Amino acid sequence: MPPLLRRFLVLCASIFAILTFNFFLFHIIPGDPIRLIARSQRLSPEQVAKLREAYGLDGSIFTQYWTYLKNLAHGDLGYSFALHENVADVVGRALLNTLILLTVSTTVVVLLGIVIGVFAGSRHGSKSDSATVVTSLVFWSLPTFWVGMLLVFIFGVWFGGLPISGITTPNAEYQNYFQYIADIARHLILPTLTLALVDIAFFVIITRTSLIEVMSEDYMLTARGKGLSRRTMVWKHATRNALLPVVTASVLYISALVAGAIQVEVVFSWPGMGLLTYNSVLARDYPTLEACFLIISVAVLVANFVADLVYRRLDPRVAVA
Amino acid sequence: MTFELSANEEATAVPASGFLAMLRSIWADRLGRIGLILLLLTAVVALLGPLVFPFNPADVGVDSSTILQPPSSAHWLGTDELGRDVFREFLAGARISLFVGIMATLISTIIGAGIGIAAGYFMGPLDTALMSATDFFLVIPALPLMIAMGAIFGQNLLIIILVIGLLSWPRTARIIRSQTLSLRQRQYVSRAKSLGASDARIIRRNVAPHVMQLIVANTILVVAGCILAEATLSFIGLGDPDRISWGSMLHFAFVSGAVGLGAWWYFLPPGLGILVVVLGFTLVGHSFERIANPRLKGH
């Protein structure tokens, strides 16, 4: 079987496993969805009976499972009684906002992390190198949400000037599209800074270790023998080869990224999947919480698959193995 | 008997006094020493603190003039949104945070090491099945899953410990499996096997002692992750309302608007506490790893 096809089948199996796992987690263990809904909402017996029928809860566990899969296939994620809206609509909006946040912050984190890592690694053993390592370990030990709280305190209470909540200024009127984008960009600054402060450490450490290894390779000695400048050696020769392990490691980062984004969205009220998850926990809005978990998990599985494809393209040795 | 002894000799090559020797070499490492000091500090605060300054959650303020007050001689770290003493709350929170982190780590280590050793030792279909499950849990995002489970199963300390512990083992399983696999290829394992030793005996006497160091090094790093996970879950609002941890303190500080009101004495101490303990475990863990695996030295 070609490795690509095998990977794809594993992805499909994993998504199916998540769907099944989700079914047991939200539909079987707590009783049934109606009991979850009824726990936080006052419903009349007629409403309960109607919901039971809609969810196919009159049948056996297999019919329930079938109904659940069928609803999902139709894009029906249920109805949120807390938000009085179809969960699919709510999730659709939140997903877009999260993607904006993730795209910007990941770009910043990865680029800065690699640059700082190369700087530290190429000065291996120097004072600035060990200072970078220690600083990275300290920031990596910080809870992301607390860093966010500190930034809210510093920029919201002390200095002011930067927006600390939401994605746009409430009731703002924009003359043109650029002003709208600029407003979103301003709201992105602190959430991105929070994620960057904590997560850059991840890429700094990995890039640095990888670069140190590459610098001791024979071809680096050859490069020096050719009389190449130090800068060409480090940035052109070593960095390119050092980046491969960084790509591999970024797969591990996806999970940390999701966790960080959830916390940042909560602290800065960024209306994405994380804030939606948080609000549905507080409101005990189980249909929404279920959809959030499902969408985030499937998105992460797909992201892993894509990262793996990229890695295979970059390193032909893996494709053969 | 003599044959068996020779088979065991290699297995017990790790010195029995390894623990003290290990502590000494961590102490000799600069970052390791800082880590040990941070951990010692946390241990003293968590164990002795609540004895000297007990915290009574019911000891709330009488009127609005007692809530979110800045530090004073009566309240060294001011008061929280209910007028309670933040300093005493901080000491009580240290205990809960550490307790949850360590218990969850124990669960995660037992599962991870068990799966890793079983998969690596027995190989074949069992290995394939266990590693497929491990890879599955490795890629699904842990925090959303923890949040979902926490929200469904309820908010108490035992649930939080179980949720974190049951979801933090995959990396341990992977590391221990590869080490077990390589141990299994060693001669003394096949020798013990041909002498008729049972699998249980070989695992107990020839495999387990050798992966122990790796398990310990990994465990120290897992504690840091589990403490951060507890803080995050509690911050989201899934902490045990009766047992306040540093994470739940930050939750209440956040939802009561203490940050916007500039009540730094409320939200700074728990965060710094988390930083100190997580950094302590991280530094000691990395130091331990470098000593146990000299190839990493200098990196």
Image (tube, rainbow, N blue to C red):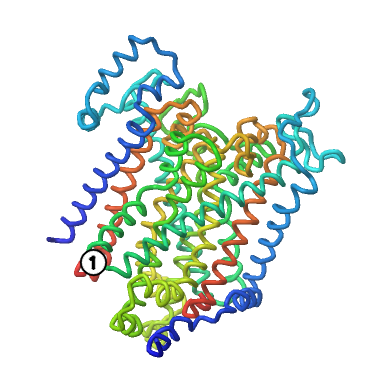
> Which residue does the image show at 86% across and 38% down from the upper left?
B74
> Which residue does the image show at 54% across and 52% down from the upper left?
B103
Q: Is residue A143 left or right of residue B212?
A: right
Q: Is residue B177 visible in the rendered structure shown here?
A: yes
Q: Position of residue A69 (x, y in %)?
A: 22, 33
B241 is higher (above) or lower (below) than A151: above
Q: Which residue is mark 1?
A: B124
Q: Position of residue A292 (x, y in %)?
A: 38, 35
Give the chain of mark 1: B
Tag 1 secondary structure? helix
Q: Quadrant of the N terminus of chain B?
A: bottom left
B11 is higher (above) or lower (below) than B256: below
> Hey, what amino acid is under mark 1?
Gly
Q: Is residue A245 left or right of residue B218?
A: left
Q: Position of residue B32 (x, y in %)?
A: 62, 70
| Nearest the eye: A215 or B132 | B132
